[in-house]
Image (tube, rainbow, N blue to C red):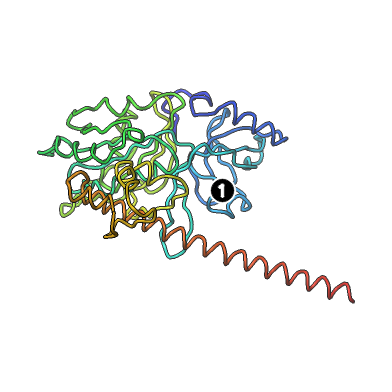
Amino acid sequence: MNDQFPHPSLSNLGYTPALATELLELGTAAIPGRILRIDGHRALVLCDEGELEATLPGRLRADPESTPTVGDWVALSPVAAADKPVILARLCRRTRLARSAAGTATRIQVIAANVDRVFIVMGLDGDFNPRRAERYLTICGDTGVEAVLLLTKAGGCDDVDARIAACQAIAPPELVLGVHAIDVIDGINPDVPARYTGPGITIALLGSSGAGKSTLLNHLLGRERMVTAEVRSGDDRGRHTTTHRELVLLPSGGVLIDNPGMRELALWLVGEGLERAFTDVESVARGCRFSDCSHCGEPGCAVQRAIDEGELDRERATSYARLRDEADANRRRRDKGRRRADERNQSKLYRRIQKERRRQKG
């Protein structure tokens, strides 16, 4: 898969002394590797021996939050000639990108691990949507990774400067390294993405289908590795040409995690993602009369006053409130689920105790 370039050192893949120490503390004759791709109970892992297909045991797949995913460092059993190596443990993550999994169940889906930077890819066509970009930035802020906004297909856009300005207005400098309009096919700023790559740096690609992620990856690789497809004429949305997550080695050093286009990106926040993505709104909100102000008509609301006086964009404030409410609702569902799980565990424990008592009585 990654045999087009010289085999890199583990340090170029992001392996650190801290990970080496953790591996030694496991007390086994394990070797380190980084997950390139996962297919059910099988994982493609890159280590000093090259690419290996390893078994991912069921005990490591029981918890969605701790299950190894693309980008994770793992401890592998020593490579034997007859058997496939087994993943013994997942090593500690520095960062992880996550969302609430699609469907009715409230559960986390980790989409990439040990990420240093995120390329948020958005087309300057019908795909352009600053509100969606705010959602991506909130996820980046929650795990503390830097982001780069890459506005693709600049060659076919008539108001590039205005759209760059619209994205710069929602891009906190503490979180976003840059906002760039590019078109690698028409030769507009084609060298910009590579500036953010380098040895030991892990980049994750996020964006909707048809935004140009596969085209960008092919450009960074210098060859046609990923299949691309035309977008629909009605809404400029594309078909899924990437159908799985995969870690890819870059010729300039470092790695890139390619993700399928996501139609749904529900929030799963555990940190300060909203605060980091909406520093402007948060700064104004500190002046509200009530600490639990919803910014929806309460007296003394500093956010509403800033909107009325033209100091804060109304759509920006509305987006903040919508994402805050969504994150709060998700937290309540998670708390309720944990309480139910605790109650079930307590009931099981009580039944086991009663059963043991009856056994002891004969």
Residue 157 picture quarter: top left
In the rendered view, tell whether residue 336 sits above or below residue 354.
Answer: above
Disc 1 marks which residue? Answer: 66
In the rendered view, tell whether residue 343 sits above or below residue 34.
Answer: below
* x 25%, y 42%: residue: 122
Furthest toward the right, the residue is: 362
Q: Is residue 244 visible?
A: yes
Furthest toward the left, the residue is: 158
Q: Position of residue 61 (x, y in %)?
A: 58, 52
Give the quarter of the figure containing the N terminus. top left
**Side of 289 where 125 appears, left or right:** left
Front-most of residues 99 and 284 = 284
* x 60%, y 33%: residue: 32
**Side of 210 where 253 appears, left or right:** right
Front-most of residues 312 and 85 = 312
Front-most of residues 303 and 130 = 303
* x 70%, y 33%: residue: 29
Q: Secondary structure at mark 1?
A: loop
Three-letter residue code for mark 1: Ser
Give the quarter of the figure containing the C terminus. bottom right
Q: Position of residue 328 (x, y in %)?
A: 41, 58
Q: Position of residue 174 (x, y in %)?
A: 35, 33
Q: Position of residue 299 (x, y in %)?
A: 28, 58
Q: How many marks?
A: 1
**Side of 49 where 246 appears, left or right:** left
* x 23%, y 31%: residue: 184
Q: Is residue 231 visible?
A: no
**Side of 82 where 37 appears, left or right:** left
